[in-house]
Image (cartoon, grey):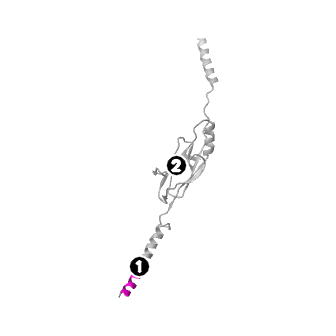
Amino acid sequence: MAGKNAKNVMPLKLLLVAVVAAVLVGCNGGKDGIQFGHPTVAVKGLNASNAKAVEYEYEELVLEVQLGLHEDALLEFTEDGTESFKHKVQDRKNYTLVLNTATDLCGFVVETEEGVELEQEMSSKKADTTFLVQCEEPEPPVVEDDDEDDEDDDDEEDEELEE
């Protein structure tokens, strides 16, 4: 009798194994399964921007890019380069990257009809997206010309003398 029950149980075990295998394949990256990826950030122009900052005696830029609300998902750049987040994001699920910097010289590149704009935040639903951050060179410091002030003072003195 044990042999007869074993014959009935065996197809059920095979069916159960086949169902479990199909579910695992579906959830592990199949077309309709859940997929994960690592967003990447590529920074360009930071080296040139920092070289000018040193020349003009400004503070060098340090860029921090944060992945959404995850405080531990942070990339830091002090020079041009490309880095990926270690934190995974789910494909087809919206996430946001935020650029933390003390200046608006750097930003995520967004192409518009008018040209290129630099934004401080970017969102995507593609897990393996590469975001480009572009940095512009700082403006030279404004140097006040003492000669101009002296000319203005001379004009005031001339007006007083005429009175």
Q: CA distance from mark 1 to mark 2?
A: 50 Å
Q: Magenta part of the protein: which range?
A: 2-13
Say which residue appears at 38% left-offset and 87% top-offset.
Answer: 3
Q: Amino acid at mark 2?
A: Val
Q: Amino acid at mark 1?
A: Lys
Reading the image, the residue beneath label 2 is: 65
- The image position of residue 137, as x and y in percent, is 61, 41
Reading the image, the residue beneath label 1 is: 13
- The image position of residue 38, as x and y in percent, is 52, 57
Which image quadrant: the C terminus?
Answer: top right
Say which residue appears at 60% left-offset and 19% top-offset.
Answer: 153
* Residue placed furthest toward the front: 2
Q: How many marks?
A: 2
Say which residue appears at 43% left-offset and 73% top-offset.
Answer: 20
Question: Magenta span: helix, strand or loop, mainly?
Answer: helix
Q: Nearer the viewer, residue 20 or 103?
A: 20
Q: Is residue 66 visible?
A: yes
Q: Earlier in the sequence, mark 1 or mark 2?
A: 1
Task: Give the structural element (helix, strand or loop) at label 2.
Answer: strand
In the figure, residue 154 lies in which quadrant?
top right
